[in-house]
Amino acid sequence: MTLIEVNKLNFSYHGTDEATLRDISFNIEKGEIFGFLGPSGAGKSTTQKILIGILKNYTGSVKIDGIEINKVDKSYYEKIGISFELPNHFLKLTAIENMQYFSSLYSKKIDKSDIMKLLEKVGLKDDVDTLVSNFSKGMKNRLNFARALLHDPDILFLDEPTAGLDPVNAKNIMNIIDTKRKEGKTIFLCTHDMMIADLLCDRVAFITAGEINITDKPKSLKIKHGKRTVIVEYGNGAVERQEFEINNLGENKDFIRLINHQYLLTIHSQEASLSDVFINVTGRDLT
């Protein structure tokens, strides 16, 4: 079931002649993690702001569950959770006070015990009574992410949710995102981190300079743009490598001989990384 439909979306910021978004179109299915991938300034955050109803003066069509986004009422915000790239908290309040304040904005009753469990999930259990002004960037980002989950929304809009996090906390946030997908949540994930997109996303769209270059499953993209070869490494001491075409491997006597080699070390397919595919498709890197 298609939940989000974007068709020929264009947008320009007031006072600028150059369009930020140019004729972009994509659909997101219910229960899908959709990765919106591109470098800084590509138009990712602008697209998200339109999808959540902050930016209004667009042309084209943006429908959420069949309703044009500029016609939704305030009940829409009961259904979505938002984690902005730049955390915005009340710095003179503690973590728990921030969460309690934002929970009061929703019609759903959210107990303090539920908030505590959520803060524990993102690794802030020991910091609930700490002023947010004393938080590191990573701690603020984790609090930002937790706030998006407060009211158990059906749709999550996540902008660089692992930015500034150490590997342990980044993996934890990724695990939570994956759990939310398994619960049937729909997730719009803006990022320039191709590893995270590769691990989490069902489909991705590449955006550069306000235009979508391609949309597909990460695996399909990597297979399509990778080399159709495997490399066999073998040796006792000095390591030797030999490359073989994938076609008719089972009939290739040299390949069969090497995979039965006494000192076989590794066999690697030459699948492209998502970063490689991005550069190949768009002609630029992610910086």
Image: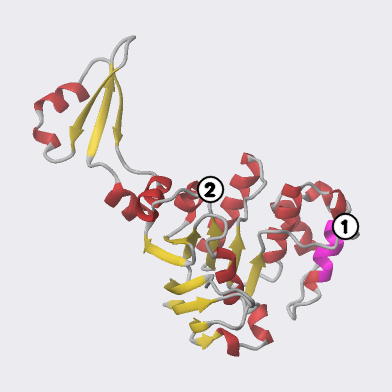
**Is-magenta flag for residue 99?**
yes
Reading the image, the residue beneath label 2 is: 287
Residue pictured at 57% horizontal, 51% vertical? 175
Instruction: Return the residue nearer the eye: 16 or 71.
Output: 16
Above or below 278: residue 21: below
Q: Amino acid at mark 1?
A: Thr
Residue pictured at 31% horizontal, 10% vertical? 236
Instruction: Return the residue nearer the eye: 53 or 77.
Output: 53
Q: Amino acid at mark 2?
A: Thr
User: Most extreme residue toward the top, as rendered?
Assistant: 237
Left or right for 139, reference 75? right
- The magenta region covers 94-101
Residue 11 in the image: state x and y as whole percent.
54, 77
Residue pictured at 16% horizontal, 27% vertical? 255
Q: Which mark is residue 38?
A: none
How far, Cα to Cα, is label 2 from label 1? 35 Å
Reading the image, the residue beneath label 1 is: 94
Residue 161 in the image: state x and y as whole percent.
62, 55
Q: Main secondary structure of the magenta part?
A: helix
Count of all numbered marks drawn on residues in the image: 2
